[in-house]
Amino acid sequence: MEIKIGIQNVVREVVIETNETPDAVEKQVSDAINNGGVLNLTDGRGRRVVIPVSTLAYVDFGGGVQGHVGFRS
């Protein structure tokens, strides 16, 4: 699943591809916002993204990308 995260005062959004379900990611986002801490997500390759929730503008859950064309590592 593809997740796009908008950050306040930042032009580019953070895009990660994760193997987690939309419900699991939504719970992580909600818990982070309720606790006033950081949003900590891990992508499909094990890369971790940590974002302070005070800077979150939006979190967009997508269905992911199917059928890539070209090289992929």
Image: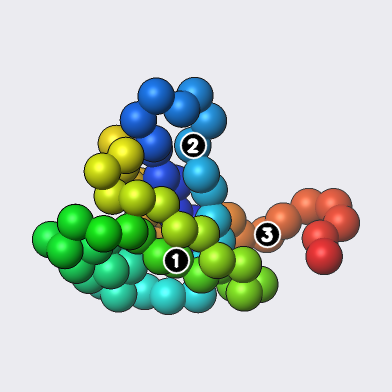
State the SS at label 3.
Answer: loop
Q: Earlier in the sequence, mark 3 or mark 1?
A: 1
Q: Please, which residue is most extreme toward the right here?
A: 71
Q: Amino acid at mark 3?
A: Gly
Q: Is residue 17 left or right of residue 63?
A: right
Residue visible at 41% across and 65% down in the picture: 40
**Is residue 49 shown to the viewer in this render?**
yes
Query: With respect to residue 29, does 23 lie above or below?
Result: below
Q: Position of residue 58 (x, y in %)?
A: 30, 41
- State if disc 1 and disc 3 touch (CB < 8 Å): no
Q: Is residue 33 left or right of residue 18?
A: left
Q: Please, which residue is most extreme toward the left here?
A: 34
**Is residue 64 shown to the viewer in this render?**
no
Quote the CA–CA distance across marks 2 and 3.
23 Å
- State if disc 2 and disc 1 touch (CB < 8 Å): no
Q: Amino acid at mark 2?
A: Glu
Q: Earlier in the sequence, mark 2 or mark 3?
A: 2
Residue visible at 35% across and 60% down in the picture: 39
Residue depth check, mark 3 versus mark 1: number of the one nearer the observer = 1
Query: With respect to residue 39, does 23 lie above or below?
Result: below
Q: Position of residue 49 (x, y in %)?
A: 51, 59
> Label 3, on which residue?
67
> Label 1, on which residue?
41
> Label 2, on which residue?
13
Q: Work out whether residue 47 or residue 17 is closer to the camera in this orientation and state it.
A: 47
The disc at residue 14 is none
Quote the CA–CA distance across marks 1 and 2.
15 Å
Q: Position of residue 48 (x, y in %)?
A: 55, 66
Residue visible at 41% across and 52% down in the picture: 51
**Crowd band around label 2 with a 10 angstrom C-alpha radius: few (<14), some (14–19), many (20+):** some
State the SS at label 2.
Answer: loop
Q: Earlier in the sequence, mark 1 or mark 2?
A: 2
